[in-house]
Image (tube, helix red, strand yellow):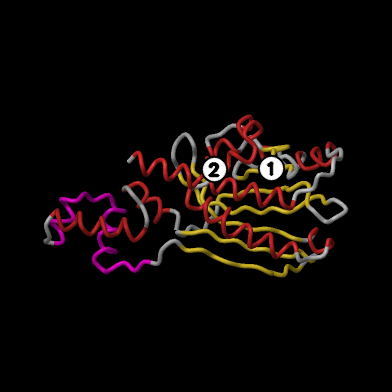
Amino acid sequence: MLYLTIGKEKLIKASLEAHRKELRAIASQKEQDIASFLESFKSHAIDGLNINSIRYILNLQDLKYEFISNSCTAFTGMKPVDFYGKGLQILSEIILGKDFNALSKDLFPAMNAIVQELSLKEKYAVVFELHYHMQNNRTGKITPVVEYSSYADFDDQGRPYISTGICYESVLDFNGVRGLVRLNRGEEQETIYDRTIYYSIYVLTPSEKKIIAYLLEGKDYKWIASTEFISPHTVKTHIKNIYKKLDVNKASELLAHFTNN
């Protein structure tokens, strides 16, 4: 168990550093007064009207949050002061580990490479869309989210200086992550990158589907075994296989998987 914990910590640390490296490579060193910009963005992020979303402004020069809405606590269990203090470091604590690894080492670099080939005018029109899972630091609840972000300012060499974004709880939930890059051309949008990374592809057997249906109804192992004329051991074996296919570790995660879909 200790070995697995250390391995997970190393993976998160490596993923975070990869994410930081990618942002620093594109971030401008330009200094400017962004107070008016911050106030304009904040005026559209009144928490009472946006309880189901998180709005943020990220300074790409120092990788610190210039603004984060109070609703971040409901999603992540972390308070705004935590975001301001930790900066980008906090992502490794609020994004599901395997999602963070896939985003920082695979999807985000690929999406950024596409953007770097664009003209400055096109970069201003870029909208990033990411699908991943946030994990509440206090409750452990896993929430599928969709995040939209864009670059708000650039230096003379076309390097982004400020990034703004908003995260919503998503109606979509799948075992993986997805990244899209679009060009916003007024009423039309052109998708120039779209990739989904699935962690596993599974096929549930008829027996497994039936057992899942029973579990969703609140039936216990003994009841299922009696109804299906199988042993409790066989029920446990089916459930073990279901967990493996769906990449979950306990009943609450299994129920959440089907509740969110």
Residue at 68% across, 59% down: 112
Q: Measuring from the top left, give residue 219's x and y in whole percent.
A: 23, 51
Residue at position x 68%, y 69% in the image: 191
Using the numbered discs, state the Cα–Cα distance from disc 1 to disc 2 in whole angstroms.
17 Å
Position of residue 195 measured from the top left corner of the image (x, y, whole percent): 58, 66
> Vertical placement of 65 versus 192: above or below?
above
In the picture, the quarter occupied by the C terminus is bottom left
User: Which element carries disc 1, helix, strand or loop?
Assistant: strand
Q: Of 79 and 26, which appears nearest the observer?
A: 26
Point 79% across, 39% down: residue: 38
The amino acid type of the residue labelled 1 equals Tyr
Which mark, by number, is residue 56?
1
Q: Which residue is mark 2?
A: 92
- Report the span colored magenta: 202-228
Residue 195 magenta-highlighted: no
Q: Look at discs 1 and 2 and give the one toward the viewer.
A: 2
